[in-house]
Image (cartoon, rainbow, N blue to C red):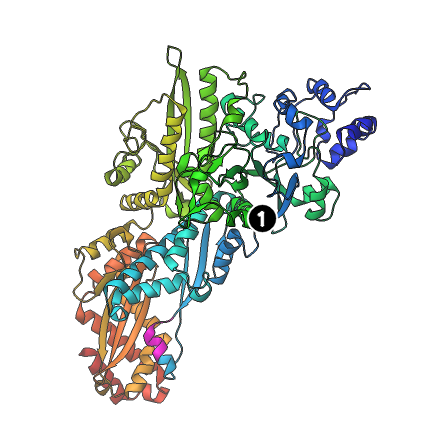
Amino acid sequence: MLTDEQILAKTADILENLDEKFSKSERSKRKKKCDNPKGFTMKQFCKNQRSRSKKGERKNESILREIEEDELRVLEDVLDDLDPANLPLNDLFSGKMRVVIPFPTTDPNTELGKFAKFFETQEYDVQWDKGTVSATREVTNISDMVASLMGGPEKKKIKKFQMKIGKLFAKIADLSRKKKEIVKNDSEFQKNEDYKRISKQIFLYIPNPGIAGPAGYDLEDLATKYGEYWKNNAGYIKKNIDEIDSDKFSIIITRHPIDVLRMSDFDQITSCHSPASRTNAYQSYYKCAVAEARGHGAVAYVVETEELLSATDTGNIDSAEQEIQEGEIFYDDKRPFTGDITPLSRVRVRHVRYYDTDTPKRYDDGQDVGMPEKRIYGADIPGIADTVTDWARSTQEEVIENMPREDGKINLNRFTIFGGSYEDTAGASGRLKLMQQLLGADIEVEGYMGQNKDTEDSIDANLVGDIIAQYEGECEQIMNEYNDRMAQTYTDYEVQDDGGEGAYIRPYAAFIAKFDVNDWKRLPSNAEEVVWSSVEAITDIYGDIFVPSDRDTPTIRRVREEIHLTIQINFEHPAIAGGSYMAFPDEYQEALQKIDSLIDDRRDAFEAILTEYFRREGQMEGGTYVNLAMRIEDRDFTSYEWDLETDGEYSDSYESTARYTHYYDPEDLGLGIEVLKQIVDSRDFKIELRKQLLEEPRKAINTQYYLSMDAVTVEKGGEIAFTAIFSINVDEPDIMAQLFQELVEGEMDDEENLNVVFNRVLAQAVKARQPASMQTNESIVNNWKNYLRT
């Protein structure tokens, strides 16, 4: 890296080669022409050029807009005596100004790598862009397995399914929890039918349990963890999973004052640490960034490895690290001759000190500790905070070992956090989270970590704007923060003059329920009552957390391959804010914190309620099945001959079955029992039986569909008990549920009609297996005719 003096000495050469330089950095559209009179310092030169430098475009994905030269004056005394040894966290950085570490996002040891590996080990096909998984499983009944072990033919049933990733983990966690409850409450759980059914369902989703998670894992915990991981990272993964690999990104961890000052000057996000040169900046929080830059804290930036190596003309990140110890390295479109690297994301590393007493005489005399935050700004690439934390933990092993303790517990009373007052993990509870982030959630502590704001309090706040501008800036930051954080909820606001010397805030937020377009029979118009009343389906259960339909009608529309239902959130609900107007931005933030947990985190539950509602109303496929399952559960839907069963309560039901058992006596048929069993176990027999059992029901409702049929054959008292099992699930078209209902309530709900079909199909199967001469033998034919009349 060139020093300021070297850059100035070579200004003429640089200007002559601007085209080439900007082409390399993709800045050819922003060619600048400028002169530097002899004798100008670097600071004077940049300030002189500021007025000529036009804001340009770097890359479409560029996310950094930087500070004005005048704003660097707050760091003049720091920059004039810039020695790494005088900056905080010198032990953490091993005396360096900047450290570069790898960021292997898809490595099997990273969270993203483990997450992706799960689907591979469990044999799923993943459609990342759609957020869905699908699988084809071979399902074998226990009786079929026993028969196979006894030398009989191996029988397999192919089952295919597709579902949302979030729903998959929710289903696995729910099944695992129910299974553990049965084991806990039933000493003979292995004989419990619910236990067997749930185990079978879990095996459908987790066919290879031995490699689904780490040794000794708990399935409910694993599914819950992965469900949360997907919820928090789905947006980035869907868009970028196919474009990233383990070498794509690196992380530059820096304590250079300018790097720290520029921590939150982003185009695609708004931060409370932005300088005044940005629109709607507010000095009260910019002071926080200045305090950090004046000797407290560090920042970890994610960059593209290829860009880092190109900017430093090196072949690996270790060599690149050596080249970035001096000068500026990050690109700034407001100031020329800074750097060529564009940060994509960042996380703060807070400056903390601990002491050997609760009341130290000098605050600058303790042991520095670097504690990474959890909050990510910019591109939310999974694993950033964990990677930086792992680095901080491994680099500070001795510092951590010597932390003050009392009776084995970390004594937080001897810790103080420095720098800016704005904390992503705020207050005593937030500082405890910082400690837990570094040491682990299970650490034992006592006391409370203090805060020192002396540096920030000493900074002149002469750029603070009026109250409306300040509220606008703060609310914009809060809005963007939560719009980035929440998956299916968005927010907006208005700031208005209150007629006096203050302002008020009117917030807005809405939840967007999302459905696959293929699940709908038809899309209702916004004028239809079925759309108006959809919000009541939720509020009947959760209370008026959404604005009632008589005050604000939900809107429904198609967005590409999804159906979106937008419902306005009710800020007047006491669990959210208790009112529609707010006096301070903090109240807006507190309300959004509650909305994030009470509404956005419950999006799967709300969508399940709405899905059930729209199914019942006939708008979505599966409504007929839901009503059918509810009637089976309530014993309101019965059949004389068929045993009906559903696998869940009401809308939780996924599959329902109907069973009928017919008994064949080999003596009446003149067949050996083994021959008879081979016949009824044959594929051709089952196909023909299903066809004939469904013939009348299919005619009755005029459909070409067939229901799925499984079968179990058991020898009992010298007879063969053949059980036909028809199944229907919520994912199948409504016409299938109608066919199921017609089967068990119509002509086939009659013992005589069932006997005729079962006997006829057997007679046809026997006849087909006999030689042609026997098929025309009059005595044999008469014998079967007599049998069919019984």
Say which residue label 1 marks.
395
- Identify the residue at image location x=51%, y=26%: 454
366, 484: nearer the viewer: 366
Q: Left of 558 or right of it: where is 598?
A: left
Residue 241 visible in image: no
277, 627: nearer the viewer: 277
Q: Left of 122 or right of it: where is 627?
A: left
Amino acid beneath label 1: Thr
Q: Where is residue 35 in the image (x, y as percent from the top left)?
A: 79, 20
Q: Left of 667 or right of it: where is 31?
A: right
Q: Which residues are the magenta region?
A: 140-146
172, 288: nearer the viewer: 288
- Identify the residue at image location x=29%, y=38%: 534
Q: Does residue 755 lie above or below 202 as drawn?
A: below
The answer to which quarter of the image holds residue 82 is top right
Mark 1 falls on what kind of element? helix
